[in-house]
Image: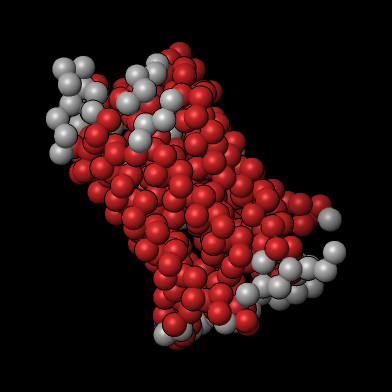
Amino acid sequence: MMRYAAVFGWFTAAYFLSYFFRSANAIIAPDLSRELSLNAADLGLMTSVFFGAFALAQIPLGLGLDRWGPRWITSGLLFVGAVGSVIFAFAPSFELLMIGRALLGLGMAGALMGAMKIFSKWFHVNQFATLSGLTVGIGSSGALVAASPLAWFNEAFGWRWVFVGGAVITVFIGAAIIIWTRNTPPGVPWTGSTDTDGGVQEVVRDRRFWHIVPLDFFIVGTMFAFQSLWAGPYLYDVMRLDAEAVGNMLIVLSLGATFGALISGWLADRVGMMQVMIASGILFISCQVALIFHPPLWLLLLVYGAFGIAGSFNIILLAHTRRIFPANVTGRAISAVNLFGFGGVFVVQWLLGAIINRFPPDAAGHYPPEAYSAAFLFTAFGTLLCLLWYIPLARTPALVMQPKEA
Protein backbone atom coordinates (compact mmCIF):
# COMPACT_ATOMS: atom_id res chain seq x y z
CA MET A 1 0.00 0.00 0.00
CA MET A 2 2.87 2.38 0.80
CA ARG A 3 4.28 1.91 -2.70
CA TYR A 4 0.94 2.80 -4.26
CA ALA A 5 0.77 5.88 -2.03
CA ALA A 6 4.30 6.89 -3.04
CA VAL A 7 3.44 6.62 -6.74
CA PHE A 8 0.32 8.72 -6.28
CA GLY A 9 1.90 11.20 -3.87
CA TRP A 10 5.15 12.08 -5.63
CA PHE A 11 3.63 12.38 -9.10
CA THR A 12 0.84 14.52 -7.66
CA ALA A 13 3.50 16.68 -5.99
CA ALA A 14 5.16 17.15 -9.38
CA TYR A 15 1.84 18.31 -10.82
CA PHE A 16 1.45 20.68 -7.86
CA LEU A 17 4.71 22.33 -8.94
CA SER A 18 3.55 22.51 -12.55
CA TYR A 19 0.38 24.28 -11.48
CA PHE A 20 2.28 26.71 -9.26
CA PHE A 21 4.77 27.73 -11.94
CA ARG A 22 2.14 28.14 -14.65
CA SER A 23 -0.04 30.33 -12.38
CA ALA A 24 2.58 32.53 -10.70
CA ASN A 25 2.65 35.29 -13.33
CA ALA A 26 -0.93 36.33 -12.53
CA ILE A 27 0.32 37.78 -9.23
CA ILE A 28 3.76 39.04 -10.23
CA ALA A 29 2.69 40.55 -13.59
CA PRO A 30 2.76 44.18 -12.33
CA ASP A 31 6.28 43.69 -10.93
CA LEU A 32 7.51 42.10 -14.16
CA SER A 33 5.96 44.91 -16.21
CA ARG A 34 7.44 47.61 -14.01
CA GLU A 35 10.92 46.12 -13.57
CA LEU A 36 11.45 44.98 -17.17
CA SER A 37 9.15 47.46 -19.01
CA LEU A 38 6.78 44.82 -20.43
CA ASN A 39 3.47 45.64 -22.12
CA ALA A 40 0.41 43.37 -22.37
CA ALA A 41 1.65 41.68 -25.55
CA ASP A 42 5.06 41.03 -23.95
CA LEU A 43 3.44 39.55 -20.84
CA GLY A 44 1.16 37.35 -22.92
CA LEU A 45 3.99 36.07 -25.11
CA MET A 46 6.41 35.47 -22.23
CA THR A 47 3.81 33.67 -20.14
CA SER A 48 2.64 31.61 -23.11
CA VAL A 49 6.15 30.33 -23.85
CA PHE A 50 5.77 27.99 -20.86
CA PHE A 51 2.80 26.38 -22.57
CA GLY A 52 4.40 26.42 -26.02
CA ALA A 53 7.39 24.43 -24.77
CA PHE A 54 5.03 22.23 -22.78
CA ALA A 55 2.99 21.49 -25.90
CA LEU A 56 5.97 20.81 -28.18
CA ALA A 57 7.26 18.27 -25.67
CA GLN A 58 4.08 16.19 -25.71
CA ILE A 59 4.67 13.81 -28.63
CA PRO A 60 8.32 12.99 -27.80
CA LEU A 61 7.19 12.83 -24.17
CA GLY A 62 4.58 10.22 -25.04
CA LEU A 63 7.18 8.16 -26.90
CA GLY A 64 9.56 8.44 -23.96
CA LEU A 65 6.92 7.49 -21.41
CA ASP A 66 5.93 4.43 -23.42
CA ARG A 67 9.55 3.36 -23.91
CA TRP A 68 11.42 4.23 -20.68
CA GLY A 69 8.61 4.95 -18.25
CA PRO A 70 7.59 7.95 -16.14
CA ARG A 71 10.07 7.31 -13.33
CA TRP A 72 12.98 8.42 -15.50
CA ILE A 73 11.27 10.76 -17.96
CA THR A 74 9.30 12.82 -15.42
CA SER A 75 12.21 13.13 -13.00
CA GLY A 76 14.68 14.09 -15.74
CA LEU A 77 12.38 16.79 -17.02
CA LEU A 78 11.90 18.17 -13.51
CA PHE A 79 15.66 18.76 -13.31
CA VAL A 80 15.41 20.73 -16.57
CA GLY A 81 12.60 22.76 -15.02
CA ALA A 82 14.79 23.57 -12.01
CA VAL A 83 17.40 25.05 -14.35
CA GLY A 84 14.69 27.13 -16.01
CA SER A 85 13.48 28.40 -12.64
CA VAL A 86 16.99 29.59 -11.75
CA ILE A 87 17.39 31.35 -15.12
CA PHE A 88 14.01 33.05 -14.69
CA ALA A 89 14.92 34.11 -11.15
CA PHE A 90 18.08 35.93 -12.23
CA ALA A 91 16.97 37.10 -15.69
CA PRO A 92 17.96 40.73 -16.36
CA SER A 93 16.08 40.93 -19.66
CA PHE A 94 12.92 39.91 -21.47
CA GLU A 95 14.87 37.42 -23.61
CA LEU A 96 16.27 35.54 -20.61
CA LEU A 97 12.83 35.53 -18.99
CA MET A 98 11.59 33.82 -22.15
CA ILE A 99 14.35 31.19 -22.01
CA GLY A 100 13.76 30.48 -18.33
CA ARG A 101 10.01 30.29 -18.83
CA ALA A 102 10.42 27.92 -21.80
CA LEU A 103 12.66 25.57 -19.78
CA LEU A 104 10.12 25.65 -16.97
CA GLY A 105 7.41 24.60 -19.42
CA LEU A 106 9.58 21.80 -20.77
CA GLY A 107 10.45 20.67 -17.25
CA MET A 108 6.84 20.51 -16.11
CA ALA A 109 5.63 18.77 -19.29
CA GLY A 110 6.04 15.29 -17.81
CA ALA A 111 4.21 15.87 -14.53
CA LEU A 112 0.59 15.10 -15.41
CA MET A 113 1.34 12.86 -18.38
CA GLY A 114 3.81 10.88 -16.27
CA ALA A 115 1.14 10.49 -13.62
CA MET A 116 -1.38 9.29 -16.21
CA LYS A 117 1.06 6.73 -17.58
CA ILE A 118 2.17 5.36 -14.23
CA PHE A 119 -1.43 5.17 -12.99
CA SER A 120 -2.28 3.06 -16.05
CA LYS A 121 0.37 0.57 -14.86
CA TRP A 122 -0.34 0.59 -11.12
CA PHE A 123 -4.13 0.99 -10.93
CA HIS A 124 -7.22 -0.61 -12.48
CA VAL A 125 -8.71 1.08 -15.56
CA ASN A 126 -11.99 1.77 -13.70
CA GLN A 127 -10.05 3.88 -11.19
CA PHE A 128 -8.38 5.98 -13.87
CA ALA A 129 -10.86 8.86 -14.15
CA THR A 130 -11.18 9.19 -10.37
CA LEU A 131 -7.41 9.07 -9.75
CA SER A 132 -6.77 11.51 -12.59
CA GLY A 133 -9.32 13.89 -11.11
CA LEU A 134 -7.77 13.56 -7.65
CA THR A 135 -4.30 14.27 -9.03
CA VAL A 136 -5.49 17.36 -10.87
CA GLY A 137 -7.57 18.46 -7.88
CA ILE A 138 -4.76 18.13 -5.35
CA GLY A 139 -2.11 19.30 -7.79
CA SER A 140 -4.13 22.36 -8.74
CA SER A 141 -3.81 23.58 -5.17
CA GLY A 142 -0.45 24.80 -6.45
CA ALA A 143 -2.48 27.66 -7.87
CA LEU A 144 -3.75 28.41 -4.35
CA VAL A 145 -0.16 28.86 -3.22
CA ALA A 146 0.36 31.07 -6.29
CA ALA A 147 -2.39 33.42 -5.07
CA SER A 148 -2.43 35.23 -1.68
CA PRO A 149 0.57 33.31 -0.23
CA LEU A 150 2.62 34.24 -3.29
CA ALA A 151 1.43 37.85 -3.06
CA TRP A 152 2.68 37.97 0.54
CA PHE A 153 6.00 36.30 -0.27
CA ASN A 154 6.50 38.54 -3.29
CA GLU A 155 5.84 41.63 -1.17
CA ALA A 156 8.28 40.46 1.51
CA PHE A 157 11.14 39.01 -0.54
CA GLY A 158 10.55 39.80 -4.22
CA TRP A 159 9.54 37.62 -7.15
CA ARG A 160 13.07 36.43 -7.92
CA TRP A 161 13.38 34.52 -4.65
CA VAL A 162 10.10 32.77 -5.43
CA PHE A 163 11.78 31.04 -8.34
CA VAL A 164 14.99 30.26 -6.46
CA GLY A 165 12.95 28.41 -3.84
CA GLY A 166 10.90 26.76 -6.56
CA ALA A 167 14.07 25.38 -8.16
CA VAL A 168 15.18 23.76 -4.89
CA ILE A 169 11.79 22.10 -4.34
CA THR A 170 11.72 20.90 -7.96
CA VAL A 171 15.07 19.12 -7.59
CA PHE A 172 13.86 17.46 -4.38
CA ILE A 173 10.68 16.09 -5.97
CA GLY A 174 12.56 14.86 -9.04
CA ALA A 175 14.98 12.97 -6.79
CA ALA A 176 12.11 11.55 -4.73
CA ILE A 177 10.47 10.09 -7.85
CA ILE A 178 13.71 8.29 -8.75
CA ILE A 179 14.27 6.98 -5.22
CA TRP A 180 10.77 6.04 -4.06
CA THR A 181 8.79 5.07 -7.17
CA ARG A 182 9.02 2.40 -9.86
CA ASN A 183 7.45 2.18 -13.31
CA THR A 184 5.44 -0.95 -12.46
CA PRO A 185 4.20 -2.74 -9.33
CA PRO A 186 6.41 -5.44 -7.74
CA GLY A 187 6.56 -8.59 -9.84
CA VAL A 188 5.36 -6.87 -13.02
CA PRO A 189 8.16 -6.35 -15.57
CA TRP A 190 8.42 -3.10 -17.52
CA THR A 191 7.83 -3.76 -21.21
CA GLY A 192 8.64 -0.51 -22.92
CA SER A 193 7.38 0.13 -26.43
CA THR A 194 10.02 0.49 -29.16
CA ASP A 195 7.51 1.74 -31.72
CA THR A 196 8.57 5.26 -32.67
CA ASP A 197 5.66 6.45 -34.80
CA GLY A 198 3.07 3.74 -35.42
CA GLY A 199 1.18 4.52 -32.24
CA VAL A 200 1.02 8.20 -33.10
CA GLN A 201 -0.31 7.39 -36.57
CA GLU A 202 -2.95 5.12 -35.05
CA VAL A 203 -4.07 7.95 -32.80
CA VAL A 204 -4.23 10.75 -35.37
CA ARG A 205 -6.02 8.58 -37.96
CA ASP A 206 -8.91 7.97 -35.57
CA ARG A 207 -11.77 10.39 -36.31
CA ARG A 208 -12.80 10.38 -32.64
CA PHE A 209 -9.47 12.00 -31.77
CA TRP A 210 -10.34 14.97 -33.99
CA HIS A 211 -13.65 15.49 -32.19
CA ILE A 212 -11.88 15.67 -28.82
CA VAL A 213 -8.84 17.86 -29.51
CA PRO A 214 -10.52 21.13 -30.64
CA LEU A 215 -12.50 21.28 -27.40
CA ASP A 216 -9.38 20.48 -25.40
CA PHE A 217 -7.59 23.26 -27.31
CA PHE A 218 -10.09 25.93 -26.29
CA ILE A 219 -11.02 24.78 -22.79
CA VAL A 220 -7.45 24.15 -21.63
CA GLY A 221 -6.24 27.16 -23.60
CA THR A 222 -8.76 29.55 -22.09
CA MET A 223 -8.64 28.08 -18.58
CA PHE A 224 -4.88 28.30 -18.18
CA ALA A 225 -4.48 31.54 -20.13
CA PHE A 226 -6.89 33.05 -17.63
CA GLN A 227 -5.59 31.38 -14.47
CA SER A 228 -1.90 31.72 -15.29
CA LEU A 229 -2.07 35.40 -16.25
CA TRP A 230 -5.16 37.32 -17.32
CA ALA A 231 -7.31 36.66 -14.23
CA GLY A 232 -4.96 38.99 -12.35
CA PRO A 233 -4.73 41.92 -14.81
CA TYR A 234 -8.52 41.73 -15.32
CA LEU A 235 -8.93 42.50 -11.62
CA TYR A 236 -6.16 45.11 -11.57
CA ASP A 237 -7.40 46.94 -14.68
CA VAL A 238 -11.19 46.47 -14.79
CA MET A 239 -12.01 46.23 -11.07
CA ARG A 240 -9.00 48.34 -9.85
CA LEU A 241 -8.27 45.96 -6.95
CA ASP A 242 -5.00 45.93 -5.03
CA ALA A 243 -2.59 42.97 -4.88
CA GLU A 244 -4.06 41.49 -1.70
CA ALA A 245 -7.62 41.59 -3.06
CA VAL A 246 -6.45 40.13 -6.37
CA GLY A 247 -4.74 37.31 -4.48
CA ASN A 248 -7.95 36.55 -2.61
CA MET A 249 -9.95 36.45 -5.83
CA LEU A 250 -7.39 34.13 -7.40
CA ILE A 251 -7.81 31.83 -4.40
CA VAL A 252 -11.52 31.59 -5.25
CA LEU A 253 -10.62 30.72 -8.85
CA SER A 254 -8.11 28.12 -7.68
CA LEU A 255 -10.47 26.62 -5.10
CA GLY A 256 -13.04 26.26 -7.86
CA ALA A 257 -10.47 24.53 -10.07
CA THR A 258 -9.47 22.20 -7.24
CA PHE A 259 -13.06 21.34 -6.40
CA GLY A 260 -13.97 20.80 -10.05
CA ALA A 261 -11.04 18.48 -10.63
CA LEU A 262 -11.83 16.47 -7.49
CA ILE A 263 -15.45 15.87 -8.48
CA SER A 264 -14.99 15.58 -12.26
CA GLY A 265 -13.93 11.93 -12.29
CA TRP A 266 -16.51 10.97 -9.69
CA LEU A 267 -19.30 12.61 -11.70
CA ALA A 268 -18.06 11.11 -14.97
CA ASP A 269 -18.09 7.63 -13.43
CA ARG A 270 -21.65 8.02 -12.17
CA VAL A 271 -23.47 10.33 -14.56
CA GLY A 272 -21.58 9.65 -17.78
CA MET A 273 -18.46 11.06 -19.36
CA MET A 274 -20.05 12.84 -22.31
CA GLN A 275 -22.97 14.19 -20.32
CA VAL A 276 -20.73 15.78 -17.69
CA MET A 277 -18.33 17.19 -20.28
CA ILE A 278 -21.12 18.88 -22.23
CA ALA A 279 -22.72 20.37 -19.10
CA SER A 280 -19.41 21.71 -17.83
CA GLY A 281 -18.66 23.17 -21.27
CA ILE A 282 -21.90 25.15 -21.20
CA LEU A 283 -21.06 26.49 -17.74
CA PHE A 284 -17.55 27.43 -18.89
CA ILE A 285 -18.90 29.43 -21.84
CA SER A 286 -21.42 31.17 -19.56
CA CYS A 287 -18.61 32.34 -17.28
CA GLN A 288 -16.73 33.85 -20.21
CA VAL A 289 -19.86 35.68 -21.33
CA ALA A 290 -20.23 37.09 -17.81
CA LEU A 291 -16.65 38.43 -17.93
CA ILE A 292 -17.48 40.31 -21.14
CA PHE A 293 -20.00 42.45 -19.23
CA HIS A 294 -17.82 43.17 -16.14
CA PRO A 295 -20.20 42.07 -13.37
CA PRO A 296 -20.12 43.66 -9.89
CA LEU A 297 -17.58 42.27 -7.45
CA TRP A 298 -20.01 40.05 -5.52
CA LEU A 299 -21.12 38.37 -8.75
CA LEU A 300 -17.58 38.26 -10.12
CA LEU A 301 -16.62 36.23 -7.06
CA LEU A 302 -19.14 33.58 -8.11
CA VAL A 303 -18.00 33.78 -11.73
CA TYR A 304 -14.37 33.18 -10.77
CA GLY A 305 -15.34 30.15 -8.69
CA ALA A 306 -17.55 28.71 -11.44
CA PHE A 307 -14.89 29.43 -14.07
CA GLY A 308 -12.41 27.34 -12.08
CA ILE A 309 -14.87 24.50 -11.57
CA ALA A 310 -15.95 24.26 -15.20
CA GLY A 311 -12.49 24.78 -16.67
CA SER A 312 -10.98 21.96 -14.61
CA PHE A 313 -13.38 19.42 -16.12
CA ASN A 314 -11.07 19.26 -19.15
CA ILE A 315 -9.43 16.29 -17.40
CA ILE A 316 -12.43 14.22 -18.55
CA LEU A 317 -11.21 14.60 -22.13
CA LEU A 318 -7.99 12.78 -21.17
CA ALA A 319 -9.97 10.02 -19.46
CA HIS A 320 -12.13 9.84 -22.61
CA THR A 321 -8.97 9.40 -24.68
CA ARG A 322 -7.69 6.70 -22.31
CA ARG A 323 -10.96 4.80 -22.83
CA ILE A 324 -10.78 4.96 -26.63
CA PHE A 325 -7.21 3.79 -27.27
CA PRO A 326 -5.42 0.53 -26.33
CA ALA A 327 -2.96 0.40 -23.43
CA ASN A 328 0.15 0.11 -25.62
CA VAL A 329 -0.40 3.63 -27.02
CA THR A 330 -1.88 5.26 -23.91
CA GLY A 331 1.10 7.57 -23.38
CA ARG A 332 1.11 8.77 -26.96
CA ALA A 333 -2.67 9.13 -27.19
CA ILE A 334 -2.98 11.21 -24.04
CA SER A 335 0.11 13.22 -24.91
CA ALA A 336 -1.28 13.95 -28.38
CA VAL A 337 -4.47 15.35 -26.86
CA ASN A 338 -2.40 17.28 -24.35
CA LEU A 339 -0.34 18.70 -27.22
CA PHE A 340 -3.45 20.43 -28.51
CA GLY A 341 -4.55 21.50 -25.03
CA PHE A 342 -1.31 23.20 -24.09
CA GLY A 343 -0.77 24.36 -27.63
CA GLY A 344 -4.11 26.05 -27.09
CA VAL A 345 -2.77 27.81 -24.01
CA PHE A 346 0.19 29.11 -26.01
CA VAL A 347 -2.04 30.39 -28.82
CA VAL A 348 -4.88 31.74 -26.65
CA GLN A 349 -2.49 33.34 -24.14
CA TRP A 350 -0.61 35.14 -26.91
CA LEU A 351 -3.78 36.17 -28.78
CA LEU A 352 -5.40 37.56 -25.63
CA GLY A 353 -2.31 39.69 -25.05
CA ALA A 354 -2.39 40.87 -28.66
CA ILE A 355 -6.12 41.71 -28.46
CA ILE A 356 -5.78 43.58 -25.16
CA ASN A 357 -2.71 45.44 -26.40
CA ARG A 358 -4.73 46.91 -29.29
CA PHE A 359 -6.47 49.13 -26.74
CA PRO A 360 -4.22 51.90 -25.38
CA PRO A 361 -3.64 51.87 -21.60
CA ASP A 362 -4.21 54.92 -19.42
CA ALA A 363 -1.44 56.95 -17.80
CA ALA A 364 -1.23 54.46 -14.91
CA GLY A 365 -0.80 51.53 -17.30
CA HIS A 366 -4.33 50.12 -16.89
CA TYR A 367 -5.99 48.70 -20.00
CA PRO A 368 -9.68 49.64 -20.52
CA PRO A 369 -12.55 47.23 -19.76
CA GLU A 370 -13.36 47.06 -23.48
CA ALA A 371 -10.02 45.35 -24.10
CA TYR A 372 -10.99 42.44 -21.88
CA SER A 373 -14.50 42.29 -23.34
CA ALA A 374 -13.02 41.80 -26.80
CA ALA A 375 -10.65 39.13 -25.49
CA PHE A 376 -13.35 37.05 -23.80
CA LEU A 377 -15.75 37.42 -26.71
CA PHE A 378 -13.09 35.63 -28.77
CA THR A 379 -12.65 32.77 -26.25
CA ALA A 380 -16.39 32.31 -25.63
CA PHE A 381 -17.17 32.02 -29.34
CA GLY A 382 -14.27 29.62 -29.95
CA THR A 383 -15.24 27.37 -27.04
CA LEU A 384 -18.86 27.27 -28.22
CA LEU A 385 -17.89 26.15 -31.72
CA CYS A 386 -15.62 23.40 -30.36
CA LEU A 387 -18.27 22.14 -27.94
CA LEU A 388 -20.74 21.85 -30.81
CA TRP A 389 -18.12 19.86 -32.76
CA TYR A 390 -17.58 17.51 -29.77
CA ILE A 391 -21.26 16.76 -29.12
CA PRO A 392 -21.74 14.30 -32.06
CA LEU A 393 -19.57 11.78 -30.17
CA ALA A 394 -22.54 11.34 -27.84
CA ARG A 395 -24.40 9.63 -30.70
CA THR A 396 -21.88 6.77 -30.67
CA PRO A 397 -22.96 4.53 -27.76
CA ALA A 398 -19.55 2.86 -27.40
CA LEU A 399 -17.98 6.21 -26.59
CA VAL A 400 -20.41 7.21 -23.86
CA MET A 401 -19.34 5.84 -20.50
CA GLN A 402 -22.46 4.51 -18.87
CA PRO A 403 -23.22 5.59 -15.32
CA LYS A 404 -22.47 3.09 -12.57
CA GLU A 405 -25.31 1.31 -10.89
CA ALA A 406 -26.22 2.79 -7.54
Task: Identify which residue, 356 or 149, lies in the foreground.
Answer: 356
Task: Identify which residue, 246 or 337, lies in the foreground.
Answer: 246
Q: Taking the image as drawn, is residue 374 in sight? A: yes
Display colour scheme: secondary structure
Q: Quadrant of the C terminus?
A: bottom right
Q: Is residue 386 above or below residue 328?
A: above
Tell me where residue 343 sits by quadrant: bottom left
Q: Residue at x 25, y 49 (%)?
A: 351
Q: Residue 94, image x and y in percent?
A: 22, 35
Residue that protrudes farthest toward the top in the picture? 156
Task: Identify which residue, 150 or 62, lies in the foreground.
Answer: 150
Tell me where residue 243 sits by quadrant: top left
Q: Is residue 137 above or below residue 70?
A: above
Q: Residue at x 46, y 43 (%)?
A: 287
Tell me where residue 372 sits by quadrant: top left
Q: Taking the image as drawn, is residue 332 in sight? A: no
Task: Identify which residue, 132 or 219, lies in the foreground.
Answer: 219
Q: Residue at x 24, y 34 (%)?
A: 370
Q: Residue at x 55, y 79 (%)?
A: 395
Q: Is residue 18 above or below residue 266?
A: above
Q: Residue 70, image x and y in percent?
A: 58, 62
Q: Is residue 53 left or right of residue 165?
A: left
Q: Residue 285, image x and y in percent?
A: 44, 51
Q: Residue 148, image x and y in percent?
A: 51, 23
Q: Quadrant of the N terminus?
A: bottom right
> Total marks drawn?
0
Q: Is residue 47 left or right of residue 157?
A: left
Q: Is residue 111 left or right of residue 223?
A: right
